[in-house]
Amino acid sequence: MRKLWALALLVFFGGCLPAEDPYFWSRTQQQTAPADPAVSAAAQGAPLVSDIPPSVTADDSSAEQFPTGVELAEPDQGQAFIPEEAPAVDPETLEDNRLLTGAGQLPPEDEGETVPAEKVVFDFPVVENDKVRYFIDYYTGPGRRTFARWLQRSGRYLPMMRQIFAEEGLPLDLAYLAMVESGFNDRAYSWAHAVGPWQFIESTGRMYGLESNWWRDERRDFEKATRSAARFLKDLHRRFDGDWYLAVASYNAGGGKVNGAIRKYRTRDFWELSRGSHLQTETKNYVPKLLAVLQIAKEPAKYGFTDLEFQPPLAYDVVLLPTATDLDVVARLCDVPYEEIKGLNPELKRWCTPPEIKNYPVRVPAGSAQRFTEAYAQLPPADRANYKRHRVSNGDTLLALAQRYNIRVKDIIALNGIKNPRALRIGTDLILPLKKGYSRLPVDEMEDDYVRSRRRTYTVRKGDSLWKIARKFSVSEKELRVWNRLGWSNVIRPGQTLAVSASGAKGRKTTGNGDGAPRKIVYEVRKGDTLWGIGRQFEVATRQIRNWNNLPKNHVLRPGDQLTLLVQARQRS
């Protein structure tokens, strides 16, 4: 009886413990900073070292060389993660996701002898062992093409990130963690809803001052997110008494998870903790990946990266917009493409600045602030915003909206692609054209432009079998075994979390003959072709084809046009 009472008390008090560690964070990538000759070179678009050996050419062609196995997703507290429909993933980002999520990466379980790295000077503790060497070989072998793109992107962000890390008193080399997190892709969006170059989940981002709502998401702002990441890393460094490996691992897994491993194995040595089963595979690989990235980035030529074209460092002016202003108006006054303004302001998810914020700071190309300010001052306030978002409520009609805003019914229909004007659905959003000469841009921007790694996971229930789960998610049993490293075993347990779609794609029907990783092809348009027909042929959405090729919705195909497509390797063009 005493044992039963003790067990009941344990269960009761266990249930009162906090459900989530306040430091819990999520996933992915790396960054850099100044005061280092390597960065000075990168900032000028040059390789990171001066002694460049003969060019080495290699191609990862991720589709053929990457095995189809993927890391098992983190446990989800008993809930199956079913992500919402997302916009098309561009081919480059899909390749980024594959390298970031660890597809085909099988480092040794034991790291072997760990010794300090030699020759190159780091301000972060860098060591070498079998695990680190595995990821060096992987990034310079199968992942070479994608990793080269990350290095080239680093020129755009590292000088700013290293400067912020210097101001926060952090090791400058630690800024490369953004590469491990996102590959410097500010639109990256993980299955765990982590966003931006530093992959904050919403709760942690809010804790460190990053706002997120329908209009903007500051987790994608490269400068604000870097400042927040620096503060978060400082807090973790203090929490783990100055041990950078534990702090970095906690950035990925959460401080509570790492503390749990320390208590379980009674050691604070990261490599010893990694030999146990408490930490997820992703966390065990996280620190070795950073150490591998640092060694390659410091001496890229040594590893065959000799023909890199580094992106130029970020350069911009900041202007304050007193009222909501369309970004295409900003682009027009700066005489630059709309995409350039969006690229400088990745936190803005829509077509204009947030209506509720006065004097909103917007980045414009360097040297254009004065020209913009003068032109903007001549612009009547009514001409700053050409569109309005309206959420349909009970009693709304197109005629009433047209009369209310002094616009034409047919313009509302045309802009929003309304098929049945008599059937407006309550709760949906309409874009209202307040000026003549409107475009479809705001409607396109109504969808979140996150690039999502859309993996599904499912928690096994009593009575489930691989066959049942495969049918439920329209995949094959073979795919489930590969994605979850089950070998030929059919044994699954209630409560076990399974990945039920490939990384970067939703589950789809298969013919049971296996399929390969997505690959990029170029399709030449033939007489009679339509986007719909090409989409059906290659099992991709029409919207994806338009996004991959930057085609407007009313684009007319002509024989001889070339289209870039991302298709399954088993398909043939």
Image: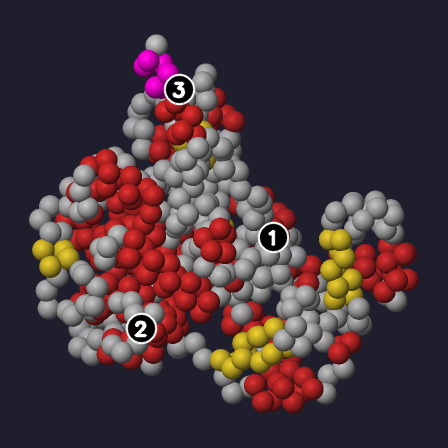
- Binning the other alpha carbons within 10 Å of mark 2 as few (below 14), some (14 to 19) or many (20 upward) gives some
The percent position of residue 66, horizontal first and vertical second, equals 32, 47
Whole-angstrom CA distance, mark 3 to mark 1, is 56 Å
- What stretch of residues is rendered in magenta? 2-8
Q: Residue at x 33, y 81 (%)?
A: 44
The percent position of residue 343, horizontal first and vertical second, equals 52, 70
Q: State which tag comes first along the sequence, 3 or 2.
A: 3
Q: Quadrant of the N terminus?
A: top left
Given the image, on which type of amino acid does mark 3 rest? Ala
Instruction: State if disc 2 and disc 3 touch (CB < 8 Å).
Output: no
- Binning the other alpha carbons within 10 Å of mark 1 as few (below 14), some (14 to 19) or many (20 upward) gives some
The percent position of residue 14, horizontal first and vertical second, equals 39, 30
SS for dot 2: helix
Q: State which tag comes first along the sequence, 3 or 1.
A: 3
Q: Which mark is residue 224?
A: none
Q: Is residue 246 left or right of residue 209?
A: left
Whole-angstrom CA distance, mark 1 to mark 2, is 43 Å
The residue beneath circle 3 is: 8
Q: Which mark is residue 543?
A: 1
Q: State which tag comes first along the sequence, 1 or 2.
A: 2
Q: Is residue 256 visible?
A: yes
Q: Is residue 28 left or right of residue 419?
A: left
The residue beneath circle 2 is: 166
Mark closer to the observer (1, 2): 2
Given the image, on which type of amino acid does mark 1 rest? Arg
